[in-house]
């Protein structure tokens, strides 16, 4: 059992717009690339060119089909899934060695790989399936919120963002302090409907998902077109008048 | 409780030793990338923030580039075949031997009959160079992959408005309020569309997806129109019908900037029927609204009367607008008439038309920017109609795709939303009128260069590439009566025609970067058989095959000689204004690739190899009078080649001092200037020249100044296309150059000068009650043609494909998870795994393209899911239409452009009982010339 900090000075996290995410997997592979070369053990791939390739990813995109309650065409939602950096992170409290911990300065949940024994309890405790045990290194891997980018003085200031946010082509991913009501991400969240992920688990995720806006409402904004002519001759009469006005 | 002690971690680790900026090649999008190196090795790739294409972002493919660069499937050295074709038995040889072998085949051909070389370059991004090479070799048989990609889109746009989507133009993403997206291949213009969708949403705009499949961009569209494949033209013309009927068209725009007011000869006895009334200088005439008299359309102050009629010597002429009103106001194109065939209710069609009208005319944008038109008339401001559209292969890859693309552009033009704020905008070197493009050439003579560029835009029968006896000059039959406007050639017909000796036999097939033995061909398994076929003497029907690629694709096994290319991080390239540049609506831009790392294998950039071959063959332009090489390699060519005096492959930093842009003599430091600038050059278009480009004097002058054109070339849009009419007129018996009898009826119908819809040919060729289902493929956003599979990260995202079935077909056949379906077309059957996809047109099934792989290819294990469960739809799409009993080979292509009609396919679906162990057909393995990939991968530098 590992303790969580009572409060954190910041609540850094991601805001992911499910209305805009096109499911391109840019965030998936940018994450894989950065985190293979940086914090902790590289993200390995077992049988990468074989029958059953299985690699470690800190972020994966799932696609779900949703049929609206009132009927209508089925809709597809692309759902990028990574650690939510929960305020009450069950993956931390379950850790027997103190390897999993939540940082008091910014709320990031991290794994200290030197202490991790690869027991997998944290992955079992996480209701979101956000942790993956690296089969080669034998340690638990998870989203670090690119803790080695966001404060990194070797990067230009504009690049001090998680790799997934920096790369997202549709601008569906945002990063900031969700504990600060005046931050851009907090304002964005306040302006939109959000999707609560398993609130009954009491995990209080920091990452926030913005709900897809209602779809298939064509016809509500524009009045039906009224004919000025129903055949060519009448149309030419209208055309003549339209030209006259120019 | 364990308390984590105060853990110190390094939050500022060094990122890399060095960043080198080059251009991505993980798809055709050509984004700028920052390649991070540590100890001289590639460690991380991210988007270049300064780059005009991607502005820093990078998609799933681009962000996985490192795994393509390190893929075990990379070819390692030149190889010659030592087993039978198709066996995969090769021996590695030196470059000297490889080039000597190639020359021993090519030199005799060039000296005797250059057309015996068929040189087709697939997903080539250097066509201005490869085309130049082929022209100097002298073969007429050259093209890249456009014919099986989206030539309908390109040609439809150029014949209608002097430009098309993607590389030719883009929505005004910052201002558009309604963006309508028709069937799109998500690997084209990939990041710009994603960035654009993000912008439209952030600005509160609306996105409408017209696509049978609700995935990807259509998943985020605010409204989804799940159209039945092949009916987009009908749907679009119903929108035109509605807008005309309601008078929601931009009359002033149509009068000023289109040929809506041109007068068409209607004398049924005249050879000029259907052509424009012209004055003695050949200038089309209009009736001036002010005087009621004839006047040249381009005279200052003339405002054409769109409703006019005019009689000369008893011959009636009516305006294009009147012909359009007659056609499109007819009930044939009413929403009620088309709804069932389109699979979309009349009410929803009307709603979209109303929304287009509302946004175009009630949300008008005004930019207070004065400008002057080409007639010299000053305009105080720029008026925008913020409706924009985009389309690609979805509407293009049908046998009615050209006319559908034309219809789409006509819709945009009727709304007055082309080249205006908020609408669709051209990117340099477009706009360019169809008349400003080259004409096709095929004049081949022994030992001489071709008489001009291979590809172009015919304006009438006189530009066709046919012999006096009517036989085709080109192996792919491009620019013949079978497909007169085949501006990109027909790569998909080359192997089939060469095998059939129709129109003639060839000696050497030389291909680059196109997986023709697999996913790039229709009828894939049979195409492989044709490549390996022998004649009655035991000789290969296609005597020599040379193939150049970076990777161990299925095609490698079918070549006699392999010229291994580099990865995209090891090579020089130029993304040139002479070719398919990376311009934006606000700017001209071009870019380079350069070797950010050196190859660790005995491989060479393909273009450099072509130069070396050209030198050994003594090709004009590549050797001087003494036979010495003019260019050492491709980089040398990029810097020093001049296409016209002062105009070369790269526009930036020209002139001895590097201070000229566009025009200027070669600058020996040019590549370094590009590297110093992040791999690209950008030259901004002046503010007053940003919109109305075809008619904007300031734009025309700017285009001349930077060397896009040598003289201003203003023009009006062709709602009515005279080149099409000239072809149609020939089919009616007018003129000396006449089509063969068997094509007359088809030409009369399909070469219509006004856009029309006709059912895809497959619907006529097969019994639609037996084959009621449309079958499509699309590319995953994270894959590009067959490449994604060799990438360990990407194949974990999509390692096998399903045939996705709509709920109706799923339930009717009692499918359950894990089932297989037998999918049968008029041509053949495949048996493949299925999955349910509710967001799908009721009569459509689809799958991901090019996931299925042949066992032994791409350095994959033979048990890889791509090879056991993955499958291709290509096996049941024939390159020919079913035999008509006339002994003729009718291409499965658009009759105007020759575009491969991939999406015409109709099938029937049955549950496969019992389930097969693997997807069928399962072809025998080929031997991998590069071995297999490693069992474990973890690389940290």
Image (cartoon, helix red, strand yellow):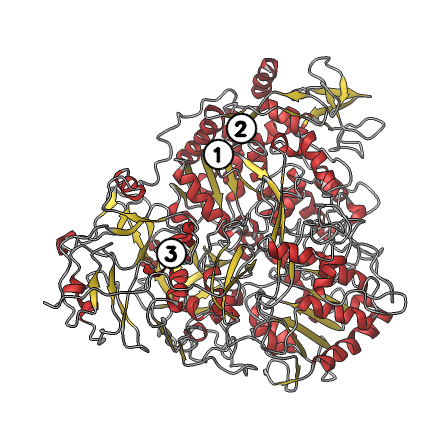
Which subunit holds the residue at mark 1? B
Element type at mark 3: helix
Circle nearer the N terminus (2, 1): 1
Residue drawn at point x = 52 percent, y = 83 percent: B931
Q: Nearer the viewer, residue B503 or B475?
A: B475
Q: Mark 3 or 1, which is nearer the eye?
A: 3
Mark 3, other Cα within 10 Å: few <14 / some 14–19 / many ≥20: many
Horizontal side of B873 relative to B447 (left or right) equals left
Which subunit holds the residue at mark 2? B
Dividing the image into 4 quarters, which one contains the N terminus of chain B? bottom left
- Please report contact status of discs 2 and 1: CB closer than 8 Å, yes or no: yes
Element type at mark 2: strand
Task: For residue B702, say whether it is visible.
Answer: yes
Residue drawn at point x = 26 percent, y = 72 percent: A113
Horizontal side of B104 relative to A121 (left or right) equals right
Residue A63 image point, x, y percent: 33, 56
Per the image, the residue denoted by label 1 is: B175
Q: Is residue B481 above or below residue B729?
A: below
Q: Nearer the viewer, residue B277 or A155?
A: A155
Per the image, the residue denoted by label 3 is: A164
Residue B504 numbered mark, or none: none
């Amino acid at each position: 059992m590992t303790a969580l900090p009572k409060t954190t000075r910041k609540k850094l996290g991601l805001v992911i717009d499910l209305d805009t995410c096109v499911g391109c997997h840019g965030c998936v592979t940018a994450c894989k690339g950065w985190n293979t070369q940086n914090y902790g053990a590289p993200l390995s791939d077992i049988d990468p060119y074989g029958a059953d390739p299985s690699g470690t990813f800190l972020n994966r995109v799932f696609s779900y089909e949703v049929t609206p309650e009132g009927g209508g065409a089925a809709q597809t939602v692309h759902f990028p899934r990574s650690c939510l950096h929960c305020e009450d992170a069950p993956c931390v409290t379950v850790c027997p060695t103190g390897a999993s911990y939540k940082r008091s300065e910014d709320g990031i949940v991290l794994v200290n790989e030197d202490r991790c024994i690869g027991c997998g309890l944290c992955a079992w405790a996480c209701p979101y399936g956000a942790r993956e045990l690296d089969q080669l290194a034998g340690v638990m891997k998870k989203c670090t919120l690119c803790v080695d980018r966001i404060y990194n003085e070797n990067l230009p200031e504009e690049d001090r963002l998680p790799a997934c946010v920096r790369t997202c082509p549709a601008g569906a991913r945002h990063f900031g302090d969700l504990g600060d009501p005046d931050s851009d991400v907090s304002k964005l969240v306040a302006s939109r409907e959000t999707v609560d992920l398993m609130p009954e688990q009491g995990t209080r995720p920091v990452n926030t998902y913005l709900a897809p806006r209602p779809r298939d409402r064509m016809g509500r904004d524009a009045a039906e077109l009224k004919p000025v002519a129903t055949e060519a001759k009448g149309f030419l009469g209208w055309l003549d008048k339209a030209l006259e006005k120019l | 409780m364990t308390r984590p002690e105060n853990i110190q971690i390094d939050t500022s680790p060094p990122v890399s030793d060095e960043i080198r900026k080059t251009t991505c090649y993980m798809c055709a999008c050509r984004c700028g990338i920052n390649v991070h190196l540590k100890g001289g090795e590639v460690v991380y790739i991210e988007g270049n923030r300064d780059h005009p294409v991607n502005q820093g972002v990078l998609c799933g493919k681009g962000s996985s580039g490192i795994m393509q660069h390190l893929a075990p499937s990379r070819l390692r050295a030149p190889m010659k075949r030592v087993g039978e074709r198709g066996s995969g038995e090769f021996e590695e040889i030196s470059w000297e031997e490889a080039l000597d072998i190639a020359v021993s085949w090519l030199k005799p051909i060039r000296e005797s009959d250059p057309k015996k070389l068929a040189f087709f370059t697939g997903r080539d991004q250097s066509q201005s160079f490869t085309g130049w090479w082929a022209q100097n070799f002298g073969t007429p048989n050259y093209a890249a992959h456009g014919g099986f990609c989206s030539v309908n889109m390109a040609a439809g746009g150029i014949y209608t408005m002097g430009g098309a989507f993607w590389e030719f133009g883009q929505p005004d993403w910052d201002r558009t309020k309604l963006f309508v997206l028709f069937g799109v291949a998500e690997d084209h213009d990939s990041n710009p569309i994603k960035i654009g969708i993000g912008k439209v949403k952030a600005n509160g705009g609306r996105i409408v997806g017209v696509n049978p499949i609700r995935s990807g961009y259509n998943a985020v569209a605010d409204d989804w129109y799940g159209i039945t494949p092949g009916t987009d033209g009908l749907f679009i013309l119903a929108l035109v019908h509605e807008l005309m009927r309601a008078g929601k068209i931009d009359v002033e725009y149509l009068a000023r900037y289109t040929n809506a007011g041109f007068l068409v000869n209607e004398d049924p006895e005249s050879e000029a029927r259907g052509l424009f009334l012209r004055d003695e200088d050949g200038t089309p005439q209009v009736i001036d609204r002010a005087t009621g008299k004839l006047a040249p359309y381009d005279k200052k102050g003339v405002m054409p009367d769109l409703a006019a009629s005019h009689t000369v010597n008893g011959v009636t002429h009516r305006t294009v607008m009147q012909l359009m009103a007659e056609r499109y106001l007819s009930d044939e194109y009413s929403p009620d008439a088309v709804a069932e065939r389109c699979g979309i209710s009349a009410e929803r069609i009307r709603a979209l038309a109303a929304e287009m009208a509302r946004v175009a005319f009630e949300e008008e944008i005004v930019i207070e920017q004065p400008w002057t038109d080409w007639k010299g008339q000053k305009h105080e401001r720029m008026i925008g109609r913020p409706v924009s559209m985009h389309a690609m292969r979805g509407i293009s890859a049908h046998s009615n795709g050209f006319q559908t693309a034309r219809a789409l552009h006509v819709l945009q033009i009727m709304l007055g939303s082309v080249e205006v704020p908020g609408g669709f905008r051209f990117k340099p070197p477009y706009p360019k009128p169809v008349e400003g493009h080259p004409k096709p050439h095929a004049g081949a003579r022994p030992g001489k260069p071709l008489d001009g560029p291979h590809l172009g835009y015919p304006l009438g029968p006189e530009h066709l590439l046919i012999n006096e006896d009517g036989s085709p000059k080109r192996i792919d039959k491009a620019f013949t009566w079978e497909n007169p406007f085949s501006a990109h050639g027909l790569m998909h017909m080359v192997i089939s025609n060469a095998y059939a000796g129709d129109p003639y036999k060839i000696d050497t097939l030389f291909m680059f970067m196109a997986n023709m033995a697999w996913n790039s061909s229709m009828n894939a398994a049979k195409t492989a058989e044709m490549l390996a076929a022998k004649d009655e003497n035991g000789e290969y029907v296609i005597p020599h095959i040379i193939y150049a690629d970076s990777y161990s694709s299925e095609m490698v096994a079918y070549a006699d000689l392999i010229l291994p290319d580099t990865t995209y991080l090891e090579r020089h390239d130029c993304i040139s204004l002479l070719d398919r540049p990376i311009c934006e609506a606000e700017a001209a831009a071009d870019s380079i690739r350069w070797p950010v790392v050196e190859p660790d294998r005995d491989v060479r950039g393909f273009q450099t190899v072509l130069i070396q071959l050209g030198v050994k063959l003594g090709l004009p332009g590549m050797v001087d009078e003494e036979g010495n090489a003019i260019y050492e390699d491709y980089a040398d060519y990029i810097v020093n080649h001049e296409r016209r005096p002062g105009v070369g492959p790269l526009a930036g930093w020209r002139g001895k001092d590097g201070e000229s842009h566009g025009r200027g003599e070669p600058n020996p430091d040019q590549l370094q200037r590009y590297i110093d600038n992040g791999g690209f050059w950008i030259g901004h278009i002046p503010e007053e020249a940003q919109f109305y480009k075809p008619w904007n004097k300031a734009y025309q002058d700017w285009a001349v100044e930077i060397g896009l054109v040598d003289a201003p070339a203003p023009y009006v849009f062709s709602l009515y296309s005279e080149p099409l009419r000239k072809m149609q007129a020939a089919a009616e018996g007018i003129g000396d150059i006449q089509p063969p009898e068997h094509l007359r009826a088809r030409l009369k119908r399909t070469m219509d000068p006004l856009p029309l819809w006709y059912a895809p040919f497959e619907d006529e060729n097969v019994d639609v009650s037996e084959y009621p289902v449309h079958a499509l493929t699309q590319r995953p956003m994270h894959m590009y043609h067959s490449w994604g599979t060799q990438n360990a990260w990407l194949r974990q995202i999509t390692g096998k494909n399903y045939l996705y079935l709509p709920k109706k077909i799923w339930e009717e056949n009692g499918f359950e998870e894990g089932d297989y379906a037998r999918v049968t077309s008029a041509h053949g059957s495949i048996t493949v795994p299925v999955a349910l996809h509710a967001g799908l047109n009721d009569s459509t099934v689809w799958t991901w393209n090019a996931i299925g792989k042949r066992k032994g290819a791409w350095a994959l294990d033979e048990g890889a899911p791509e090879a056991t469960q993955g499958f291709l739809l290509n096996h049941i799409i024939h390159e020919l239409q079913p035999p008509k009993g006339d002994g003729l080979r009718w291409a499965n292509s658009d009759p105007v452009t020759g575009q491969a009609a991939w999406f015409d396919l109709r099938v029937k679906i049955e549950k496969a009982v019992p389930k097969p162990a693997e997807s069928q057909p399962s072809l025998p393995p080929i031997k991998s010339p590069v071995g297999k990939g490693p069992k474990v991968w973890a690389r940290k530098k």
